[in-house]
Each structure stands twice: as C-alpha cells, then as structure tokens.
Amino acid sequence: MGESDIFAGLASVLPPERILGSEAARRVYAHDAYTVDRSAPDVIVLPETTEEAQSVIRWCLAHQVPFTPRGAGTGLSGGAMAAKGGVILSTKRLNRILQIDIPNRRLHAQAGVANLKLSQAVAAEGFHFAPDPSSQSVSTLGGNIAENSGGPHTLKYGVTAPHILAMTWIDNAGEVRTWGTGVEGGPGPDLLSVLVGSEGTLGFVTEAWVKLTPLPARVETLLASFPSVVAATETVAEIIAAGVIPAALEMMDRNILVAVQAAFGLEVPAGTEAMLLVECDGSPAAAQAEIEEVYAICQRFGAIELKLAANEAERKHLWTARKKGVGAMGRLAPTVVTHDGVIPRSKLPEMLTFVYEVAEAERLGVANIFHAGDGNLHPCFYFDDREPGVVERVVRAGERILTKCIELGGSVSGEHGIGVEKVDFMPLMFSEADLALQGDVKRMFPISEFANPCKVLPNLKGCVEHQRRWRGAAH
Amino acid sequence: MAGGGTLSGRRLRGLGTKQGFLAPAVAFESTLGEGGLIDFSPADQVVEVGAGMPISELQALLGAEGQCLPLLDPAEWGAAAAGYPGTVGGLLACNLPHGYMASCGMPRDWVLGATLRRPDGTEAKSGSRAVKSVAGYDAHKLGVGAWGRGLMYVRVILRTYPTKGLPAMSIVQSAPIQAPVFIQRCLRSDFDSMLRQTPGVVAHDPQTQVIWSQERPATPPEGWVIGPGGYRARPAWMDEAEAAFLSTFDPEGDWI
C-alpha cells in the first residue's frame, strides 16, 4: 500500500491534521537518537486518546500496514525506527496527566508525558517519580516503560518496572487491556513486569498508573576527582563492598571532563583523570553517615579533591558535568555514538581498560560517562562520519565491547534496549533454547508481523532483507 | 473465590512451608535436588544458587560476608517472614509480602537472572549477573508469583543486601503468627478501614498496607487476598494474565 493510500485510509479514523506525511517529517522520524540505521515511515500519526490509538492500530492490522510506537525519540537502539516503513504511532499528543492520587501515592498519566513533568506535578506535595533517565526532560513515560529505563538514581530506587502499578495498553490484535491495580504483588505470574521493558513489541501503552516516591529528607552530594581511572573504579567497588548503597554513583573520565570544562566552565583540578559523583539520601542522620563513609573511602583511594555540596545550588552545579556531559561531547567531534553494556560492577577496572584498548586499536576517540554503581557502561565514541570506513570501525568497536560484557557475566544492554541495533548480538548472549523461551514469552500475547517489526529477537519474519536497506543508512 | 488447581498433575514442592496456601495435591515433584552455591560475589552483591537451596542456608552463607536477603527471622515473625525458611525457588514463586518490602521491594525485584525448567524438562536461561539489563524479554520474572506453575526455577541469580544498611522494618505484630494465614494488600486510603474490619489480625504493615490475619478478610476494593487451601481473591486482569501464561508454558496442566 502506497503512502497516499495509507494517508487517505488513516484520515478515515483520525483528523487529518494529526497525520504527518511530508518529506521533512518522514526524514525526521526515520530514526531515533541511534542514528546509524535509518528507515523512513510512510506517515506519522498523533493520537490523543487510547480509543484513537486503537482505531489506528486496528486499521493498520486490517490493511497489513506495519506500525511502530514512538515517544520522544531519545531511544539509543533504534527501537522507534519504522523498520519496515508504514506508520509511526507517536505518543506526542498523549500528553495529559489524568489524575494525581496523593493519598495513595500514585499518578495516572498518558504515555506521552515527559518523565520530568511527572515529578514536577507532585514536587510540591513532597513526591517524585523515581526513575530518572538522563533524557528525563524530554523522554516519555511510555518510552521509559518500553525500555524499562534506568538513570543515575537507579542504584537505590530501581529501574522503571517497580514503579509501574498499572497500564492501559493495546495488544497486537487491537484489543485494549488494563493490567495492574494500585496495589502491587498478588497471586499470579507477574506479566506486568514482563510487559515493562518489552520495547513496545508486545503492545502499545497509552496510559499508566505510576508509583510516587517521597522526596528524601536530606540529600548529600559529593564530587571526587581521581588521578587515574583505575583509582576511581576501585573506589566504586570499595563503596559497594563496604555495604553503602548510595542513591547515585556516577563516573566521568577525562575526555568527558574536557568537553564539559570547555562547554560549561566546570573546574577540573590538575591531574584529574576521572571524577565520581556520589549522592547519598534518606534521613538526615543516614545520609550524613553514608556520605562520611564515602568521603573516607575516596580519600583512602587517593582522591585529589573532594567537593561536598553545601546547598541545592551547589548540588546542581556538581551535577552539571554528569547531566550535560553527553551534550557537551558535540564539541569533540561531529558524531557521537553511545554504547550501552553492563557488567558486574567489580569488573569495572578490567572493563574500562579494555574499552580504552579497543578505542586505540580502532583509532576512535572514546569518552566514558556512566552509572558506575550499576556497572552500566556508556562508552561514547566520537568521530567524523564523513571519514571513509569510520562507521565500520565504530560498529566493530561496539561489538568487541559487548562481547566482553557477556564474557564478564554482564549483558548487551543495561538500559537502552535491543531495538534494531543489537538484534544480532542476542545469539551471543543467549542460546537457541534461551531465545526460544523468549519467543514463547512473546507468544503469550497476540502476535502480528506488522506490529513494531524487526525488534528485540533476531531473524524475525521478513526482517533480514529489510535490514540490508536500513543498516548504516546514515550514509 | 476458591482455586489453586485440581487433584491431577504434580505439585512442585521445596521445603513445603507454603503448601498450606494451596489446594491439596497428591503427587509432588521435589525441587530440593537443585541446591548448592554456584557463585557469590560479595563485591557485586550478587549470588547465584540452585533454587532448591533453603533460604536459611543462603542467609548463613551471605551473613558470613555481611550480606543477606532482607527477610525477617521466622522464629519471631512467622508468616510475615515470607519465604523464610523455605527455599529460594519458593521465595520467588510465591512472592509473598515481607517485612522489608517498603524499603527493599519484593522478591520480584531481587531476581536478576534464572535458569528455568518447563514441565517437559527443557531448560533455558534469562537475564544475567548484572544488576540491570534490558536484553530481550525478562522471562526470569515470569515464574514470580506463579506459585510453581508453568515454569520452575532451577538456578537463580539474586541481588543481595548489606546487613548493616537494612532500615527499620515497619510491621506491627499483635498476636503470634501461625502459618498459613490470610494475607491481604490494599490501597493506602482503604488501609485503616480494612484493618478495622478484618477479624483475627495478627500483624500489619502500615508502610505497604499488608494485613496478616487468622480469619478470612473481606476482599479489599482494590487489592488482593491470599489464603489457606488455595483461597485467592484477585482482580480480573490477573486471571487473564495467568491464562495467557499457562496456555503457553503448561498447556497440559502438568504442574498444579
């Protein structure tokens, strides 16, 4: 079915002004924040209600047109790419907070509401939505659910799944379901936990009830500078081994710091090769005791400088490098590809050494800014994609790093998902029997080859030939 | 509403501490053969064990390194101690409320990976030793709350907690607990009223709105009840989810 037929068909179920089909729009929606692979949709639709989204999905299923959900497009594995073209089902207009229930510490919102808006809506009442991906000012609730997103405070508060109480979603047969209640747990297999993190392949989430977490009474933030990456990673291991669970434990290496220094004037003491940002929270006494212990460990492992935030303004300043690090990397090179792998955290020193060796061997710039406490690495390769052969080297470097993550007992994705980017890595981590188990997880729900095709599992029907079209289409 | 299986089929059984929460069965399949420590990395706060390992054995092993699973001592807390003193597999399969739930979450949140066995004997693994991962579908969470149906935990990778960091727990005990009991969970806004109208309350947790009682409570307006002999009161979506799960993983009803 051609683009104009799809446009005309969808105009029968949605007001035409909420269907985009211009060349410019199709180009913008051809990829998410993972830009190496690209595949343009035929049209983009912007439903405002669950019913409208259901009408679109039913139309697509009836006419065998592929459809792919998309939030803010901040995903880093091509999960929102229209792998077989067709329709992008955007949550951009599903942007209303529907109900705030403070007595029961929960909030009901549509899937397109930005993560940060959820917290802002209840901050005055002393609550927040705990998952805080770095993209939180734009990334959406629906996207966070799809990727089971983490963030700097995942270490203490967990990823998205434990914060989702209930969801309204449209399955891949076009039926609306509401699963979950305001009360967690209960007698029955926990399929809600499987739906969260399924990368939008098992259904399209339109609304969710999220858990609200009280804001901590006290937050202590420490920025520690180290003379070597090894000293910083060993400090991380020691903090965890000492039984301290900070709210956040983040690391930045020298190349990130150079970029942040240039962009935002962050002061970096001479001789700094890595910085740790550590945050402890809770009751005033507990937060104080924990940060003192962390402070002492940092000193013991040779920190050059330790800065403790005295107030909220200083705390925000100390977070500058971490929050704006990836953005500042634009100063280093025209293109940045952020990888995402995770390992048992005691393996951090070995893993980081390996990352630097790979970058050198592949003649790539690399900067590391990541969730050290979770063992979740984000090596950012920076390069000029006009240079012949460089994309191949970046892809190869990524493969070597992810293979090493698996070797060390970790995973090919900590929080960015498999999307289209890592589909071919799944057999490295999982055997045929393991993948068959995952295939059966998918088969618990209605399946359609037109619903968000070619994501998560390898060798899905008709995807190999499409992959040839989109792979490396940035060129 | 009664439920919990029929007299045909086999029942997975570890130490049998939670069998009272299920309807009677005549044939059992022991999970105790799958025990033993596979790997413990105190620095990572991650342990991998055979799912038949008794929780008491695991706690002793973790305690030697200043770590634990955040569960109460059963001598003092009875059923509020959740899976303790059963097995690791039983802890996950039953996913019962426990004393540190407000601060440490549910057993669901501790399982990082697992090797799972189906009724036909085939095994597969899911997850990893990393503390977070989005690599495919989280099959290792599927058996959580399934009460031993569909998928059996064979080996599990769990997150552990430092003993010294455990916060004060918030359970209020009003009478000695003798398992099994009725366990209900309700909304915060319904908690006071449910607490008042539930007969024979033996313990309650105002932080997580869980009430343990010797007698059957009314069904909360929003929430669920687990009780002896397979008594269950739960929202309709759980029936739908369980039907989807069982028709895929145990269509013959081999495990009850």
Image (cartoon, coloured by chain):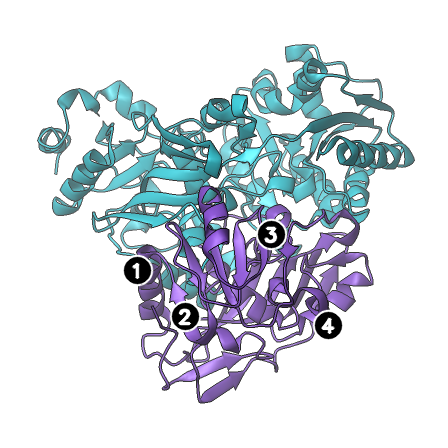
Chain colours: A cyan, B purple
Chain bearing mark 1 = B
Mark 4, secondary structure of its residue: helix
Query: Do the residues at pointers 2 and 1 share their chain?
Result: yes
Q: CA distance from mark 1 to mark 3?
A: 26 Å
The amino acid sitting under disc 3 is Met
Look at mark 3 in the image and give the residue it sits on.
Answer: B101
> Which amino acid type is shown beneath numbered disc 1?
Glu
Callouts 4 and 1 close, C-beta under 8 Å? no
Q: x%, y% of residue A344?
A: 68, 51
Which of B233 and B34 lies nearest the eye of the viewer? B233
Q: Are marks 1 and 3 on the same chain?
A: yes
> Label 1, on which residue?
B240
Q: Earlier in the sequence, mark 4 or mark 3?
A: 4
Real-space CA distance between mark 2 and mark 4, rounded to the nearest whole angstrom: 30 Å
Q: Nearer the viewer, residue A455 or A335?
A: A455
Q: Of circles 4 and 3, which is in front? A: 3
**Could you confirm whether marks 4 and 1 are on the same chain?**
yes
**Disc 1, SS:** helix
* Dot label at residue B57: 4
Is residue A138 in sight in this rendering? Answer: yes
Residue drawn 56% across the image and 20% down it? A327
Tell whether label 1 touches label 2 (CB within 8 Å).
no
Q: How many marks?
A: 4
B82, A169: nearer the viewer: B82
The answer for how far apart the CA atoms under marks 2 and 1 are is 18 Å
Above or below, A87 relative to B152: above
Position of residue A377 measured from the top left corner of the image (x, y, whole percent): 63, 39
Dot 2 or dot 1: first in sequence order is 2
What is the crowding at mark 1: few (fewer than 14 residues within 10 Å), some, or many (at least 20)? few
Q: Chain of mark 3?
A: B
Dot in front, 1 or 3: 3
- The nearer-to-camera label among 2 and 3 is 2
